[in-house]
Image (tube, helix red, strand yellow):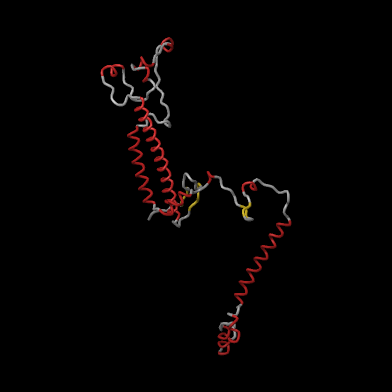
């Protein structure tokens, strides 16, 4: 029994590989078997890759063509796939904003833009905006004869020069009894029209800015949601005008 115990203990001894002898210390550490194994595996992996590439080059068809060759030109010996502009996920401006700003700051600026837009809309009323769809006003008459003899100015009881106006179209009685207020000179009217056009331009720029900030805040929020470790599936890719859409696994709240 004692001899068996001694034999069992001898097998439990760890095998130590010898280190570099003292007179060879200037050569560095002595390579162990595990180091050689890593080096050998790396060497064989590279040799197999080179052999596979050599075989692929030998078996290549010189007349081979596919349409992706047009959209993936060579740059420094590497095929680079061209991305259409409309398929870009994030613009440079959005990248800079998402790197430097927090979602709370972006949302605060967006809300401020919305308030400015509402105030501008209240001042301008959008009555003569170019982008606004034209309204239709239908008048009903009793006979075809009245259709041919229909006079819009008489029906609206206003001057013929004011028929095309969408707003500020007074009746004949108002024109006769009340005094005209505001600018009448053509030069002053032209100046006012120019100022109104400038205000509409500012309004359109603010609306575009608000849309961009809304997209940026959505993308930042999506990146925050992706940090959650629950399972998710991408439903829609990210574009310059919208964030990516993910479907998350439903979790029961305890």
Residue at the spot 34% in from the left edge and 44% down from the top edge: 112
Q: Exactly how many numbered labels are in the figure?
A: 0
Residue at the spot 45% in from the left edge and 56% down from the top edge: 230
Residue at the spot 39% in from the left edge and 38% down from the top edge: 202
Q: In the depicted view, which residue is nearer to us: 162 or 99?
A: 162
Image vertical order of residue 80 relative to residue 27, above or below = above
Q: Horizontally, is 226 left or right of 83 in the view?
A: left
Q: Horizontally, is 46 left or right of 87 in the view?
A: right
Q: Position of residue 157 (x, y in %)?
A: 33, 16
Image vertical order of residue 239 relative to residue 165, above or below = below
Residue at the spot 63% in from the left edge and 52% down from the top edge: 74
Asked whether the viewer can see residue 6, the reply is yes
Q: Position of residue 222 (x, y in %)?
A: 44, 51
Q: Position of residue 104 (x, y in %)?
A: 36, 51
Q: In the depicted view, which residue is nearer to us: 152 or 192?
A: 192
- Which residue is situated farthest in the top direction here? 145
The image quadrant where one finds the C terminus is: bottom left
Asked whether the viewer can see residue 19, the reply is no
Q: Horizontally, is 32 left or right of 243 in the view?
A: right
Q: In the depicted view, which residue is nearer to us: 92 or 134?
A: 92
Q: Position of residue 94 (x, y in %)?
A: 45, 49
The image quadrant where one finds the N terminus is: bottom right
């Amino acid at each position: 029994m004692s001899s068996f115990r001694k034999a069992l203990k001898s097998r439990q001894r760890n095998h130590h590989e010898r280190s570099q002898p003292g007179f060879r210390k200037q050569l560095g550490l002595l390579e162990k078997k595990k180091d050689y194994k890593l080096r050998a595996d790396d060497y064989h992996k590279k040799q197999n890759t080179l052999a596979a590439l050599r075989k692929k080059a030998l078996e290549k068809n010189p007349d081979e063509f596919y349409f992706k060759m047009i959209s993936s030109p060579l740059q420094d010996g590497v095929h680079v796939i061209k991305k259409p502009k409309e398929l870009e996920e994030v613009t440079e401006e959005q990248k800079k904003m998402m790197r430097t700003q927090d979602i709370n700051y972006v949302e605060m600026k967006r809300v401020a833009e919305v308030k400015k837009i509402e105030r501008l809309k209240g001042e301008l009323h959008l009555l003569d905006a170019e982008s606004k769809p034209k309204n239709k006003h239908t008048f009903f008459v009793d006979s075809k004869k009245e259709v041919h003899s229909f006079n819009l100015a008489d029906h609206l009881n206003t001057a013929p020069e004011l028929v095309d106006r969408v707003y500020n179209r007074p009746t004949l009685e108002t024109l006769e009894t009340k005094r005209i207020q505001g600018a009448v000179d053509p030069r002053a009217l032209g100046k006012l029209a120019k100022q109104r056009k400038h205000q509409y331009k500012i309004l359109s720029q603010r609306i575009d800015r608000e849309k961009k900030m809304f997209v940026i805040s959505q993308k930042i929020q999506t990146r925050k949601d992706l940090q959650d470790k629950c399972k998710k599936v991408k439903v829609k890719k990210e574009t310059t005008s919208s964030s990516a859409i993910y479907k998350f696994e439903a979790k029961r709240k305890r």
